[in-house]
Image (cartoon, helix red, strand yellow):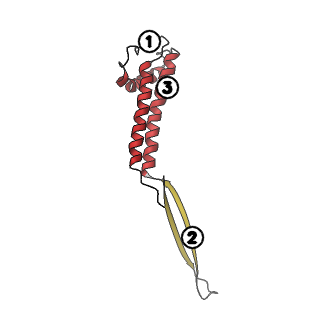
């Protein structure tokens, strides 16, 4: 939803030739996102980063990427924060270093964080102002 702001500017031009001044009105409408829409975009952005990080973790583990690589190590370390709450839910979510494996905990974390995003967005949208007629 966008807020609309209408600005009306009226100016009077006084000419020597004309006995009466000419009045000219200009109006413009400025569209900008509402605070709720901005909040929704921020939520989607933050959760999008988390989801991309988790997807990169899943792909890197499937391809048995070397942890000695600084980028791989960075992705593993950063994404571990988001996987940790979901670790231990299943007996098969242990991943050994250097082996190609599907990190079940990361897949569950991806699903869990996506569901949390949807719930938060639904709560934010409850308080969205209704459209004006």
Above or below, comparing residue 89 to residue 29 in the picture: above
- The image position of residue 2, as x and y in percent, is 49, 54
- Residue projecting furthest to the front: 133
The answer to which quarter of the image holds residue 83 is top left
- The residue located at (45%, 53%) in the rendering is 34
The answer to which quarter of the image holds residue 46 is top left
- The image position of residue 69, as x and y in percent, is 49, 18
Asked whether 130 or 38 is in front, the reply is: 130
- Indicate the secondary structure of the residue bearing disc 3: helix
Disc 1 target residue? 97
Above or below, comparing residue 49 to residue 16 in the picture: above
Precedes in sequence: disc 1 or disc 3 = 3
Above or below, comparing residue 87 to residue 133 in the picture: above
- The residue located at (38%, 17%) in the rendering is 90
How crowded is the residue under tag 2: few (<14 C-alpha within 10 Å), some, or many (20+)? few
- The residue located at (42%, 33%) in the rendering is 115
How crowded is the residue under tag 1: few (<14 C-alpha within 10 Å), some, or many (20+)? few
The answer to which quarter of the image holds residue 119 is top left
Disc 2 target residue? 26
Disc 3 target residue? 55
């Amino acid at each position: 939803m966008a807020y609309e702001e209408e600005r009306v500017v009226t100016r009077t031009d006084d000419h020597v030739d004309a006995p009466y001044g000419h009045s000219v009105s200009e109006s413009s409408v400025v569209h900008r996102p509402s605070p709720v829409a901005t909040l929704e975009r921020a939520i989607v952005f933050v959760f999008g980063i988390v989801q991309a990080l988790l997807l990169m973790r899943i792909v890197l583990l499937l391809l048995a990427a070397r942890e000695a690589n600084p980028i791989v190590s960075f992705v593993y370390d950063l994404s571990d924060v988001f996987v940790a709450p979901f670790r231990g839910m299943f007996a098969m979510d242990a991943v050994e270093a250097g082996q190609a494996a599907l990190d079940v905990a990361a897949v569950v974390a991806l699903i869990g964080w996506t569901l949390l995003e949807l719930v938060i967005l639904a709560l934010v949208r409850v308080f969205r102002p209704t459209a004006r007629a």
